[in-house]
């Protein structure tokens, strides 16, 4: 899923002769430390498709920018005044 999107992005960029963007990847320990989650929670997020990843051999890597964007979206939704109940 993510791998095919990366290949498509590389193909499009090479067609325009633009330099390829740098994709920063976190390993599982970096994601767990940043999000303050356990190994089992990271496993569940991965299996449910809630967090994108790339599997290389028997290791998983996670796109840093996508994780940061998803976190920002969830924080914005949580702070959305239209979602609050009137008390």
Image (spheres, rainbow, N blue to C red):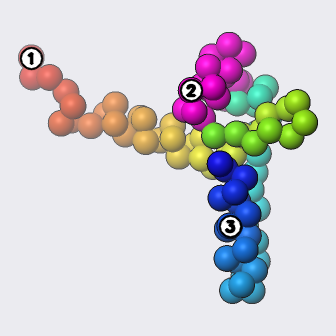
Q: Would residue 20 be found to the left or right of residue 78 on screen?
A: right
User: Looking at the image, which is closer to me, 4 or 60?
Assistant: 4
Location of residue 50 by image quarter: top right
Please tell me the numbered disc located at residue 87: 1
Check whether the beta carbons of the residues at disc 3 and disc 2 lie within 8 A of each other.
no
Residue 22 x, y percent position in the rendering: 76, 62
Q: Would residue 54 be found to the left or right of residue 68 on screen?
A: right
Residue identified by numbered label 3: 8
Residue 9 x, y percent position in the rendering: 67, 68
Tag in front: 1 or 3: 3
Image height check: is 38 above or below 52? Answer: above
Q: State whether the magenta stretch is mostly helix, strand or loop.
A: helix
Task: Examine the structure image and report whether residue 43 is included in the region drawn in magenta.
Answer: yes
Of helix, strand and loop, which one carries label 2?
A: loop
User: Looking at the image, which is closer to me, 86 or 63?
Assistant: 63
Range of magenta residues: 32-51
Quadrant location of the C terminus?
Answer: top left
Residue identified by numbered label 2: 48
N-terminal-most mark, 1 or 2: 2
Task: Look at 61% across and 19% down and name the residue there.
Answer: 44
Q: Mark 1 packing: few (<14 Cα in 10 Å), some, or many (20+)?
A: few
Task: Look at 68% across and 20% down and name the residue there.
Answer: 43
């Amino acid at each position: 899923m993510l791998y095919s999107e990366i290949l498509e992005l590389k193909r499009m960029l090479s067609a325009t002769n633009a330099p390829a963007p740098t994709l920063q990847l976190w390993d599982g320990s970096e994601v767990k430390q940043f999000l303050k989650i356990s190994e089992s929670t990271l496993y569940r997020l991965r299996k449910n498709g809630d967090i994108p990843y790339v599997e290389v051999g028997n290791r998983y890597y996670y796109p840093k920018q996508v994780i940061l964007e998803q976190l920002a979206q969830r924080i914005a939704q949580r702070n959305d005044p239209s979602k609050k109940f009137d008390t």
